[in-house]
Amino acid sequence: MVGGIRAAALLRRTGVVCCAAFLLAACEEKNTYVAPPPPTVTVAEVIQQPVTTYLELTGNTASINSVDLNARVQGFLTSINYADGQVVKKGDLLFVIEQDVYKADVAQAKATLAAKQASQVQAEAEFNRQNQLAKQDFASQATLDQARAKRDGAVADVQNAQASLDLALINLGYTEVRAPFDGVVTAHLQDVGALVGYSGPTKLATIVEVNPIYVWFSLSEQQVLNIKEGMAKAGHQMMTLRENPSAVPVEIGLQTETGFPHQGKLDYIAPQVDPNLGTLTVRGIFDNSKLSLLPGLFARVRLPLGKAVPTLLVPDSIISENQLGPYVLTVSADNTVSQVQIKQGQLQPNGLRAVEGGLKEGDRVVVNGIQRAVPGSKVTVEKGAITAPVQPTPVEGQSPAVPVPAAPKN
């Protein structure tokens, strides 16, 4: 019994000694800092694609023709032959003014003309008879002259009567107000039974031609000079554009539309810059057979400044700004992050931004994890890609237009 107790005490002393030795050995080891792994970012190589540079402006749509329909003769309005806001064709009958008086004037003028024509026949016969008698010395020269004067007077009376008949027919024609061209007619301003034309022309309605439709916009003086300089470098003159403005395509989009879905062509360029505003007025013309465009709308206008040229593209979402301007983060071959200032160009419809300086094809830019990429630090790279721009689909039946030569940027 005594031996067992001594053995247990010996074991306890041995355990204490071993624990103390282990703790002493542990205290002799040094603590070392282990750096965390580099952050992971997604990079993609800058791509180069053909891109057309555009000049984006603002303008307004306008009708190609707008005419007030007036009552030009006096009378009561007897009928309105269209529905307010109706699309009509050229020559369609729209209003009728009472015609009884004007038909009677026509009949009276016809009767007067017939009487004058009869008098002319009689005067012509009398002149011929006196002429024959004068040749045979049976009539005096005074009698012949008198017969000739009556004949000439009868001819003038016939001409006067014919003019009166023509005037009566014109006035009768004014009792029918017809559409001068295809268009949309506004609400009528006079009701059936109203007396119109009693103190001058009376406005009945307005007809507006909306197919095709114009878009008016202005170029600043600087933009005009840039275009002129660009054309000169391409071997063209501004007069070439004036002689054939329809060679330049124009695109527009409304406020609620995405992009520029309406395609047209340049139609008119003002001959001079407005010295007060410093702008040059330009007009485009667009097909509007579906009547999707209304006169007076605000429109975003886009003009091409040249043919498509190879251009570097990056996602617009990766571009940041600092005091020096826009910049992107790039990753070198050894996975070191750098901050590169760029000169950004036009934003493309698919969200890519043209880059005109600061990058070259093949550079790797950070497209995801930008907040984890610190300039000068290392990163772990995951490979990504930049989607190529989607080329616009041409409108069916539209011939490709020749773009304006490229103009230099400011």
Image: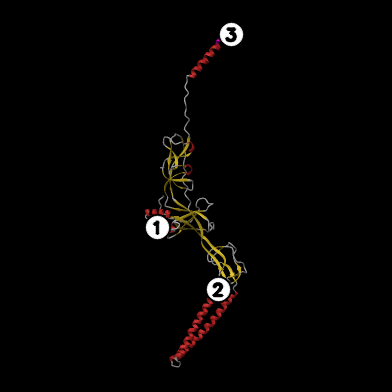
- The alpha-carbon separation of the residues under discs 1 and 3 comes to 118 Å
The colour scheme used to paint the residues is: secondary structure
Which residue does the image show at 56% across and 68% down from the upper left?
A: 70
**Which residue is the extreme one toward the right?**
193
Q: Amino acid at mark 3?
A: Ile
Instruction: Reply above or below: 49 against 187.
Output: above
- The alpha-carbon separation of the residues under discs 3 and 2 comes to 146 Å
- First in sequence: mark 2 vs mark 1: 2
Q: Amino acid at mark 2?
A: Asn
Crowding near pointer 2: few (<14 within 10 Å), some, many (20+)?
A: many
SS category of the residue bearing label 2:
helix
Which residue does the image show at 53% across and 12% down from the upper left?
A: 14
| Residue bearing mark 3 | 5
- Magenta residues span 1-10
Whole-percent x and y of residue 175? 57, 71
Let me know if residue 178 appears in the view: no
- First in sequence: mark 1 vs mark 3: 3
| Residue bearing mark 1 | 238
Crowding near pointer 3: few (<14 within 10 Å), some, many (20+)?
A: few
The residue nearer to you, when weighing 116 against 33, is 33
Main secondary-structure element of the magenta-colored stretch: helix
- The alpha-carbon separation of the residues under discs 2 and 1 comes to 50 Å
| Residue bearing mark 2 | 171
| Quarter of the rendering containing residue 133 | bottom left
Whole-percent x and y of residue 383? 46, 38
Q: Amino acid at mark 1?
A: Met
Which residue does the image show at 49% across and 81% down from the upper left?
A: 156
